Image: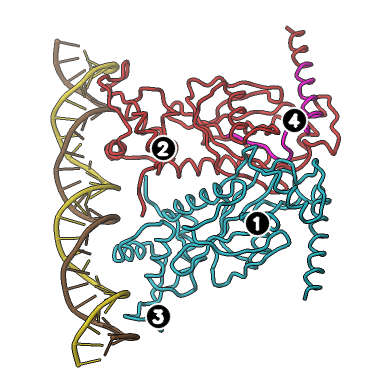
Chain colours: A cyan, B red, C yellow, D brown
Amino acid sequence: MRILILLSSMAAKRNIESIVVNGASIFLPSVSVDCVIFGFHDNDMKVLLLQMKHTDEFGLPGGFVLKDEALDTAATRVLQERIGLTDIFLQQFATFGEPNRSDKKFHVKAMKKEGITIDKNNWLLQRFITVGYYALVDFSKVIPRVDELSVSCSWFHLQSLPTLMMDHNHILNKALETLQQQINHQPIGYNLLPQKFTMPELQKLYEAILNKQLDRRNFQRKILVYGILKKLKEVKQGVAHKAPFLYSFDVKKYNQALKNGYTGGW
Amino acid sequence: MRILILLSSMAAKRNIESIVVNGASIFLPSVSVDCVIFGFHDNDMKVLLLQMKHTDEFGLPGGFVLKDEALDTAATRVLQERIGLTDIFLQQFATFGEPNRSDKKFHVKAMKKEGITIDKNNWLLQRFITVGYYALVDFSKVIPRVDELSVSCSWFHLQSLPTLMMDHNHILNKALETLQQQINHQPIGYNLLPQKFTMPELQKLYEAILNKQLDRRNFQRKILVYGILKKLKEVKQGVAHKAPFLYSFDVKKYNQALKNGYTGGW
DNA sequence: TATCATTGTGTCAATGTGACGCAATGATAA
DNA sequence: TTATCATTGCGTCACATTGACACAATGATA
């Protein structure tokens, strides 16, 4: 076992070294993507965060953009590598480009501990702007993965987030704000809930995103008039108290609403 | 006169040559900003477009980001250089990064006609992603300026836009969509109208942005409850028919609404 | 079998919205 | 000078939406 760890550690080092050395010829300079991955579990919104090797700082999963890769594709690739999911809801929400947002010492320190010396002109130490994406994923299907640069990859409650590296707290807040806006204009839930769900579950999701209590009866009325739900003939099994009906999304109408948005306003 | 043009043309060439040669050491690689500048005039929304020297293609005013410059600052600088205005409403709305969005032949061709040979490894010919900003400006105060790379800089009706270079039509459309969304949630007009304006003028602005007719009486009722307007005691001078009252924005409440947004939704 | 948290359904008043009426105004035409 | 008429200011009305709350039905647990 010890040997395996050592071997994998050596392999990891070679991989990292390769990226440090060859990154400049593989990746688009100056540009990265960062993903805010939202999941819903136990009536709570959660975000997937990494803890970085060597420095133990927390951060958003991110990555670089290949020379010939679209931004969206890069974000999708990061998600794929990180949580093993494809075909999820992904949305670009903002780009962050303060000149001092990168923490250059971070890479130097981390690489040093990895046993890699990094030239001060190395591409990794240049300034980066980052394009922020947020993803909505089905918590239950996610398999968080640790990679060579991180020691953990796990979910955090929105209410008890750690301090994040660089400007990642800012990025996360902006993602949440955007999500809170979106929920007013387009349906949300298809990517966060299981296929079949109850009205109280859907309501809890909305409450978690908006961080605010909603009236049970008014919520049901309002969500139903959007016409994106199908009421099933089954009720939830194995619950205490009265069993609530199950619903599922009417995918066709859901996607239509995603595209056109709810009205409201002018 | 002939000599002056020749001189300025030579100076321009030297400037451009300097940027081509030194750009890589001055600018952040791979990143540009593009600005969609909206103005309101003659009851119509207009956009400021450039016509490029040598190729005669139309495009959005844009620029590169200095090595140590924030993205927002770069956009502000472009506006400042282009229309001589500071202190305007500027908002980042999306970032565009398809790998094939840049037209490499464009630069080669343009530079060739300028008499500048450009190496195929030159930074200008690399792939760029661009951060889109839209600006709302007071049409009457704008002084469009032609620079060394363009032959014209002028306003176009939204309804009769020319075909733009690269993906600029797409960028412009996205900016307009964003603006149409924003108008539902935050006040708009302070940066597009003169200090004093009439209710019909404000309505025409909304109609131009939304590209849709609004009922005069309902519009007034709705806009007034937002509480961002101050009704003045004067009426518009020198108009045919009944003189409408003048209004101005209540700057304090306007900014408050800008920050908090109108409610609506959950 | 009684209890009780939870669900399904509905009511009601207050507010917001869309469609439209009508008199006042004041430049222009007769 | 007076009549005309496009435009403005200020409403009304029916209808939809919203927030707050009532009450009976359900069905696991005590």
Please give the chain letter of the residue carrying mark 4.
B
Dot 1 amino acid type: Asp
Determine which residue is flagged by label 3: A236
Name the main secondary structure of what is drawn in magenta: helix
Determine which residue is flagged by label 1: A56
Crowd rating for badge 2 (residues with CA inside 10 Å; few <14, some 14–19, many 20+): some
Report the front residue among B66 and A59. Answer: A59
Task: Residue B58: tell me if it is visible.
Answer: no
Question: Are callouts 4 and 1 both on one chain?
Answer: no
Crowd rating for badge 4 (residues with CA inside 10 Å; few <14, some 14–19, many 20+): some
Dot 4 falls on a residue whose secondary structure is helix
Of pointers 4 and 2, the one earlier in the residue sequence: 4
Dot 1 falls on a residue whose secondary structure is loop
Query: Could you tell me residue B4's position as x and y percent?
Result: 74, 9
Question: Are callouts 2 and 3 both on one chain?
Answer: no
| Cα distance between the residues tagged 4 and 2 | 35 Å
Of pointers 3 and 1, the one earlier in the residue sequence: 1
Q: Is residue B199 above or below residue A183?
A: above
Determine which residue is flagged by label 4: B26
Which residues lie in the magenta part?
Answer: B10-35
| Cα distance between the residues tagged 2 and 3 | 44 Å
| Cα distance between the residues tagged 3 and 4 | 63 Å
Determine which residue is flagged by label 2: B258
Quadrant of residue B85 in the image? top right
| Cα distance between the residues tagged 3 and 1 | 42 Å
